[in-house]
Image (spheres, grey):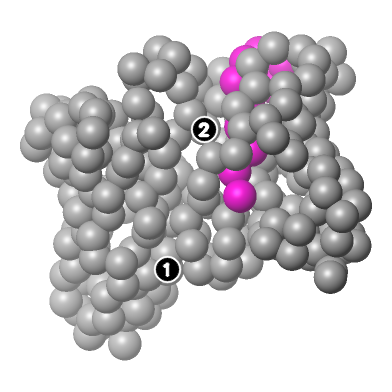
């Protein structure tokens, strides 16, 4: 099946610093990737849709200047949390849809997630 | 009203029994539905996808879709302790631009 790789799996950073998270589709090309955030005991919330070669689409309430998304190739999207603060501590998960499977309705495959802790 | 709703649980079932999970969705135009399993501290993994009314079986899992009632369910037969996890129902919500929207998840505990 489709494999999505996410790195790092966990990171601890100091308040005010920036953290970059990478998401790669390993065996398929992904023109679109999705970034989710999950706080403890809550469900996944879509943050933004990453589009290869164009600007990301952010969900309401998500600051685009704080969560920078770059989708420079068909297999790589990055999320940079800028000037991180303790309230940004969360589980960040990327996902992509393998359109080879069944076109536009194919399910999302998730990376293993990145647990960010801001001290 | 939430777009995808699930009972948060926990749903406690004895080992070997059938676990029955339910999910309702608000957008009648939604066409694609998915069940994901998420272990604590891990990312979700796809269990089933279902697009047509009726039942779809895969091993010990059966997904059921009833578009008229806007209802999706998941049955886990012969439940095992390793099935203990949170199960997320997700739908491609047409009214939200076909974005995959998740329910809050149902926590399942399978007791030996």
Measuring from the top left, give residue B64's x and y in whole percent: 79, 25
At x 23% / y 81%, what residue is drawn?
A: A13
| Vertical placement of residue A55 versus B54, above or below | below
Q: Secondary structure at mark 2?
A: strand
Q: Residues within 10 Å of mark 2 (few under 14, many from 20)?
A: some
Q: Secondary structure at mark 1?
A: strand
| Closer to the camera in the image, A109 or B59 | B59
- Whether residue B92 appears in this view of the structure is yes
| Closer to the camera in the image, A90 or B83 | B83
Q: Residues within 10 Å of mark 1 (few under 14, many from 20)?
A: some
Could you tell whether B8 is left or right of B104 in the image? right
At x 35% / y 78%, what residue is drawn?
A: A117
Q: Looking at the rendered structure, which numbered label has been put on residue B65?
A: none
At x 67% / y 50%, what residue is drawn?
A: B87
Measuring from the top left, give residue A67's x and y in whole percent: 25, 55
Q: Is residue B7 magenta?
A: no
User: Which quadrant does the C terminus of chain A fall into?
Assistant: bottom left
Chain hosting mark 1:
A
Residue that carries the numbered disc 1 in the rendered image: A90
- The CA span between labels 2 and 1 is 20 Å
User: Which quadrant does the N terminus of chain A fall into?
Assistant: top left
Q: Which residues are magenta?
A: B24-37
Residue that carries the numbered disc 2 in the rendered image: B100
Q: Quadrant of residue B60?
A: top right
| Vertical placement of residue B2 versus B40, above or below | above
Measuring from the top left, give residue B16's x and y in whole percent: 87, 55
- Whether residue A35 appears in this view of the structure is no
| Closer to the camera in the image, A114 or B84 | B84
Chain hosting mark 2:
B
């Amino acid at each position: 099946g489709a494999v999505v790789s996410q790195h790092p799996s966990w990171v601890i950073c100091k308040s005010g610093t920036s953290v970059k998270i990478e998401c790669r589709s390993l065996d398929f090309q992904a023109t679109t990737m999705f970034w989710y955030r999950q706080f403890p005991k809550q469900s996944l919330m879509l943050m933004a849709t990453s589009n290869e070669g164009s600007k990301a689409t952010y969900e309401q309430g998500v600051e685009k200047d704080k969560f920078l998304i770059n989708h420079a190739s068909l297999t790589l999207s990055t999320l940079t949390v800028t000037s991180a603060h303790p309230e940004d501590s969360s589980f960040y998960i990327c996902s992509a849809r393998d359109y080879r499977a069944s076109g536009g309705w194919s399910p999302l495959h998730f990376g293993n997630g990145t647990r960010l802790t801001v001290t | 009203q939430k777009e995808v709703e699930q009972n948060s649980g926990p749903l406690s079932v004895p080992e070997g029994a059938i676990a029955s999970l339910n999910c309702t969705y608000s957008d009648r135009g939604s066409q694609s539905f998915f069940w994901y399993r998420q272990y604590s501290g891990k990312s979700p993994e796809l269990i089933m996808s279902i697009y047509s009314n009726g039942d779809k079986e895969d091993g010990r899992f059966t997904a059921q879709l009833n578009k008229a009632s806007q209802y999706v369910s998941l049955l886990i037969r012969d439940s095992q302790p390793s099935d203990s996890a949170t199960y997320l129902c997700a739908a491609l919500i047409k009214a939200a631009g076909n974005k995959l929207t998740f329910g809050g998840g149902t926590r399942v505990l399978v007791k030996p």
